[in-house]
Amino acid sequence: MSSEGEGRFHMVDVSLITSGSRRAMLRTDDDVRIEAVYEPSPASVTDTAVVVAHGFTGSADRPAVRRAARVFAQRGAAVITFSFRGHGASGGLSTLGDREVLDLAAAVRWARELGHARVATVGFSMGGSVVLRHAALARETDGHADAVAAVSAPARWYYRGTQPMRRLHWMVTRPAGRLVGRYGLRTRIDSRAWDPVPLSPVEAVPLIAPTPLLIVHGDRDAYFPLDHPRMLAGAGEAELWLERGMGHAENAADEELLARIGNWLTRA
């Protein structure tokens, strides 16, 4: 794919959920429909929006994503959640972090369209790799991020060093695995191999500065051991939080950690 170019944001449909909250279908630069939810901040005035990128097999409506959105809103930011392609009510097929950069770019541009002068991104696991790549590739476009946090993100592609990652590779590379993903985990996976292989997260990090960057990782992460966050933080200018007792991604992020991340995103 080519995600380096500056994309164009297209609104497909918008409906009001509650006062100020909106559910929309966005159209990406490669013509995929992406479901997104906007929730204003309880604060009377805020110029900051936080865009939340979920992990693989997640969606905008998963409880862990909704919990993160609620906590971030309590820290004084408007929040946009969305479902990556192949997830939830979004169209398309999951490319495991490659073309998902276009999904995030559409959500960020929607935040700007809604009047937010400052947009921060936070991603979990696969979403963490996406926010890193987006921050590098969109830095000088109207879809850029003003602060970036990657939680439980991989540093490099094709990692198979843990049992959960070996299971994940089986699911995305085998026809039977993709059937499990579609019907068991409600995630539709593209069967095509990457061509070309996208910029890796660790290759993206040096390109992000001077945008503030936070790397968060748990010391009990069963998917990616601690060499991943250390490699990411060592590749460029980044703040590193190693969280004692934390597992993997949004399901493992408790409200105290989410509040600290929210404070960092709104003040960085």
Image: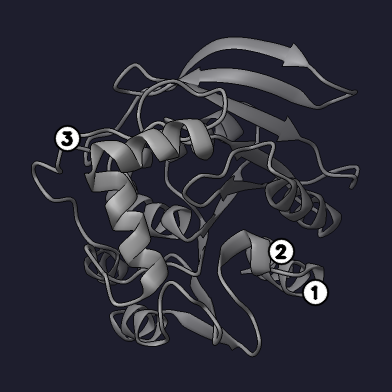
Relative image position of residue 129 (x, y in whole percent)? 38, 58
Counting residues from the start of the chain, the first of labels 1 and 2 encountered is 1
Residue type indicated by callout 3: Arg
Q: Nearer the viewer, mark 3 or mark 1?
A: 3
Disc 3 is placed on an element classified as loop
Q: Amino acid at mark 1?
A: Glu
- Mark linked to residue 256: 1
Left or right, 180 with reference to 201? right
Q: Quadrant of the N terminus?
A: top left
186 in relation to 216, above or below? above
Count of marks placed on residues: 3
Sequence-wise, which precedes: disc 3 or disc 2? 3
Residue at image point 57% right, 34% down = 112
N-term mark: 3 or 1: 3
- Label 2: few (<14), some or many (≥20) within 10 Å? many
Instruction: Determine which quarter of the picture holds residue 3.
Output: top left
According to the picture, the residue beneath numbered tag 2 turns out to be 262
Say what amino acid the circle numbered 2 marks. Gly
Q: Are marks 3 and 2 in contact (CB under 8 Å)?
A: no
Q: What residue sits 33% from the left and 48% below the top?
A: 171
**Residue reaching furthest to the front:** 176
Dots 1 and 2: beta carbons under 8 Å?
Answer: no
Q: Quadrant of the C terminus?
A: bottom right
Q: Mark 1 vs mark 2: give the one in front.
A: 1
Tell me the distance, in whole angstroms, between the alpha carbons under discs 1 and 2.
Answer: 10 Å
Residue 259: image location, x then y, percent: 77, 68
Q: Secondary structure at mark 1?
A: helix
Q: Which residue bears the numbered disc 3?
A: 192
Q: Is residue 82 in sight in this rendering?
A: yes
